[in-house]
Amino acid sequence: MFGFRLVEPEEDATVLLGEFMQAWVDFERFLSKAALSLGIDTRGRPIIPIRIVQKLEDGGFISQVEVAEVNHLRQTRNEVVHGIKNHKDILGSKMVHRLTSLISELEKRLQKQAAI
């Protein structure tokens, strides 16, 4: 009526699930690039995300608090993917936003280190 909604619609759980999974895929792609930047030889094998996160922590690129966040997000992803918990009950847009912003922050840190 006045050009804005009086009531915001609830988050579409299916869309949110897709956004979360896409963000996780983007995170794993970032980790693959980070492994190369850090000189980690994957020999063409799939990376194990938690190992790359540990290397990022060892190199000072990620804090312990951020590692805990990644572990929480990884646990959430696993619970959803393996059907342990319903995505409608545990996913939120803040989780998607945090994961995408964490990727951006980590990319900047690695680029800054590469420029030195």
Image: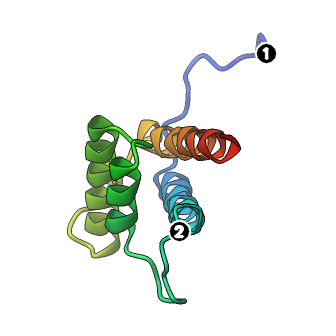
**Residue 94 vertical placement versus 58 (above, below):** above
Indicate which label's residue lies in the foreground, 1 or 2.
2
Residue found at x 59% / y 62%: 37
**Residue 81 vertical placement versus 108 (above, below):** below
Dot 2, how many residues are within 10 Å of its Cα: few (below 14), some (14-19), or many (20+)? few
Indicate the position of residue 57 as horizontal and vertical percent values. Answer: 34, 48
Label disc, if present, on residue 19 of the rendered structure: none
Residue found at x 51% / y 67%: 35
- Please, which residue is most extreme toward the bottom here? 44
The amino acid type found where label 1 is placed reads Gly
**Residue 53 vertical placement versus 115 (above, below):** below
Considering the numbered disc 2 on the image, is that residue within a helix, a strand or a loop? loop
Which residue is denoted by mark 1 in the rendering?
Answer: 3
The amino acid type found where label 2 is placed reads Gly
Indicate the position of residue 78 as horizontal and vertical percent values. Answer: 29, 68
Could you tell which of marks 1 and 2 lies nearer the N-terminus? 1
Q: Is residue 89 visible?
A: no
Which residue is denoted by mark 2 in the rendering?
Answer: 39
- Please, which residue is most extreme toward the left here? 84
Indicate the position of residue 26 as horizontal and vertical percent values. Answer: 58, 60
Who is closer to the viewer here, 70 or 22? 70
In the displayed structure, does residue 18 sit left or right of residue 112?
left
In the displayed structure, does residue 78 sit left or right of residue 114?
left
Q: Is residue 59 visible?
A: yes
